[in-house]
Structure formats: C-alpha cells, structure tokens
Image: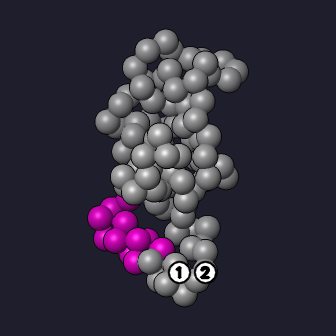
C-alpha cells in the first residue's frame, strides 16, 4: 500500500465521523479535510482486505488505490476502474449503500 495511504487512528476516525454528523445535522457539507481522512481510511482498508492490482478505485480529489487480486496493472489506465465521489464511497464503505444501488 502506498505510504500516503494509511488507516486512520480510531480516535481520529471517531472525530471525523462526529464532524460529518454535525455538518449533516446543520444542513452543511463536511469539510474537505474531514472527508480526506475518511476516504483515505476506507481506501486503505480496502487495499488491506483485498490486496491486488486489477481494480483501481478512485475518489477524486482525495486518493486512489489499486486492489483486488487478478491481472497486475503497471502502466496507463487499469482494465477495471471504479470512480466515485466521497459521499458515495463512504456510503459504500460503511454499508449504508449497496453497489447495486450506487
């Protein structure tokens, strides 16, 4: 896994989710810094649980990761790319949203 991508500490993760809930309760969008912590955490979790290079998951502008065993990808665009916004990625990663519904 790239050095720039790591799971958040449990305390940092809890603080970030508290900030998301507070923003939503106020009818606002969470800050980019909060979304960055959460997006990178769940991308790192994906890479740890399904290591590989056959699928690239992109959540611009925050990060991307290659995961899932299979054909190794080294140059250009991988054969399988999933690109989504931060809100959809977090909903998928936490089970709030299914892949079928996304």
Confirm whether the magenta stretch covers residue 43. Answer: no
Q: Residues within 10 Å of mark 2 (few under 14, many from 20)?
A: few
At horizontal 40% and vertical 36% (from top left) the residue drawn is 47
Q: Residues within 10 Å of mark 1 (few under 14, many from 20)?
A: some
Labelled disc at residue 74: none
The quarter of the displayed image where residue 36 is located? bottom right
* Residue 41 visible, this angle: no
Labelled disc at residue 23: 1
Which residue is at the far right?
A: 76
Q: Can you give x and y, in whole percent of width and height, for residue 40 in the image?
A: 48, 52
Q: Magenta-highlighted stretch: main secondary structure?
A: helix
Secondary element at tag 1: helix
Q: Which residues are magenta?
A: 6-20
Labelled disc at residue 28: 2
Confirm whether the magenta stretch covers residue 8. Answer: yes
- Would you place residue 5 above or below residue 8 in this image? above
- Would you place residue 13 above or below residue 78 in this image? below
């Amino acid at each position: 896994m790239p050095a720039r991508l790591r799971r958040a500490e449990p305390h940092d993760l809890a603080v970030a989710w508290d900030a998301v809930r507070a923003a939503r309760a106020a009818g606002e969008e969470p800050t980019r810094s909060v979304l960055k912590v959460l997006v990178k955490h769940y991308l790192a979790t994906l890479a740890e649980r399904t290591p590989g290079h056959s699928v690239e998951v992109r959540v611009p502008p925050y990060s991307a990761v290659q995961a899932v065993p299979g054909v190794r990808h080294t140059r250009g665009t991988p054969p399988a790319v999933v690109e989504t916004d931060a809100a959809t990625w977090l909903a998928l990663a936490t089970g709030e949203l299914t892949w079928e519904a996304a």
